[in-house]
Each structure stands twice: as C-alpha cells, then as structure tokens.
C-alpha cells in the first residue's frame, strides 16, 4: 500500500469560501465605521429644537464611570435563603394539590350551613315575584319593547 498521500487529502472549497466570507464581513464592518453620521447630519434651522441641538452638541459633560455605581444594599437576603424560600413554596404547592385532588372533598351536609346563613339574613323574604303595580308596569313595558320589529317587506 504505497498510495500517494494527496489521494486521501480532503481538499474542498469550504476553506476558501470561509476565507472569502470572512473578508467580506470584515469589509462590511469597516465600511460602517467610515465617517460620523452625527457630525454630518444637518439640523433644520426652522426646527423648534435647533438651538438645543446645537448647544448640546458642543457642550462637554462628564460621563459616568463604573465607580459611580452604588454598592449593593447590605440588608439584602442571602442567596441560600432564596433557595430555601423556593423549596418552601414547592412544599406548599404540593400540599395544596394533595388537599384539593379529585375525590378528596364533597359537598354533603350543607344543611347546617344553609340554616346558619338564613338565620343571619333574617326572616324569609317570601315569594320572589314582585307584587307592586309600578314594577309590574315597568316589566310589561320592557317586554313590549323587547319584541322584535316587524320584518321589512
């Protein structure tokens, strides 16, 4: 087996294509840096903000530094207690799911609850239908207004 090594070499266009793509990307990035669009931009002299733009463009200001960032508060919860609180929340969730799972509660024996609620409300209200003539007249008027209009023929 004395074959030539060049027969087993993988020469594809992938490497040259990557190089060409890299050169194109670098050229595009550098082309974006050519010139300052803010320095060349003209402000309309008739604009209401023209004076402010000109004044602020030539005004020198001190920029903030990293030293201006305030330190974190000292009364902050430690990192481990956040995890413990999350664990407690997961346990509470599991307890609620267990307590409210299907077939764990029923609505039987509500008579005592109903009797207590009725005793708090007071005596029976009586029939639910209205007996006053004014409310009956109002209801009759609403029924008449609720009828659909005749079909246009």
Image: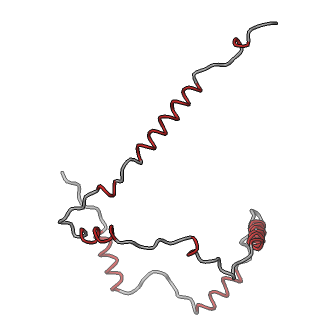
Instruction: Give the answer, above or below, for where 89 lies relative to 75.
Output: above
Residue at image location 63% in from the left, 91% down from the top: 119
Left or right, 29 with respect to 41, comes to: right
Looking at the image, what colour scheme do you see? secondary structure
Left or right, 147 with respect to 9, comes to: left
Left or right, 29 with respect to 53, comes to: right
Residue 14 figure quarter: top right
Residue at image location 82% in from the left, 6% down from the top: 1
How far across and how far down the image is residue 75, in percent?
69, 82
Query: Visible in this render: residue 105?
Result: no
Instruction: Give the answer, above or below, for where 16 lies relative to 144.
Output: above
How far across and how far down the image is residue 112, in percent?
71, 83
Query: Visible in this render: residue 33?
Result: yes
Left or right, 60 with respect to 98, comes to: left
Q: Residue furthest right?
A: 1
Instruction: Give the answer, above or below, for where 139 lies relative to 120.
Output: above
Residue 110 figure quarter: bottom right
Compare residues 25 and 131 and report the one nearer the observer: 25
Residue 70 figure quarter: bottom right
């Amino acid at each position: 087996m004395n074959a030539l090594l060049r027969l087993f070499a993988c020469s594809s266009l992938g490497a040259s294509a990557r190089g060409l793509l890299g050169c194109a990307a670098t050229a595009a990035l550098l082309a974006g840096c050519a010139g300052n669009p803010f320095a060349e931009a003209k402000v309309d002299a008739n604009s209401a903000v023209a004076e402010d733009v000109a004044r602020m463009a030539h005004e020198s200001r001190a920029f903030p530094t990293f030293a201006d960032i305030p330190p974190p508060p000292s009364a902050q919860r430690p990192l481990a207690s956040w995890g413990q609180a999350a664990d407690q929340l997961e346990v509470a969730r599991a307890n609620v799911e267990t307590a409210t799972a299907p077939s764990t509660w029923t609505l039987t024996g509500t008579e005592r609850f109903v009797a207590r609620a009725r005793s708090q409300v007071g005596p029976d209200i009586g029939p639910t239908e209205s007996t006053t003539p004014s409310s009956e007249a109002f209801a009759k008027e609403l029924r008449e207004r609720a009828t659909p209009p005749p079909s246009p023929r």
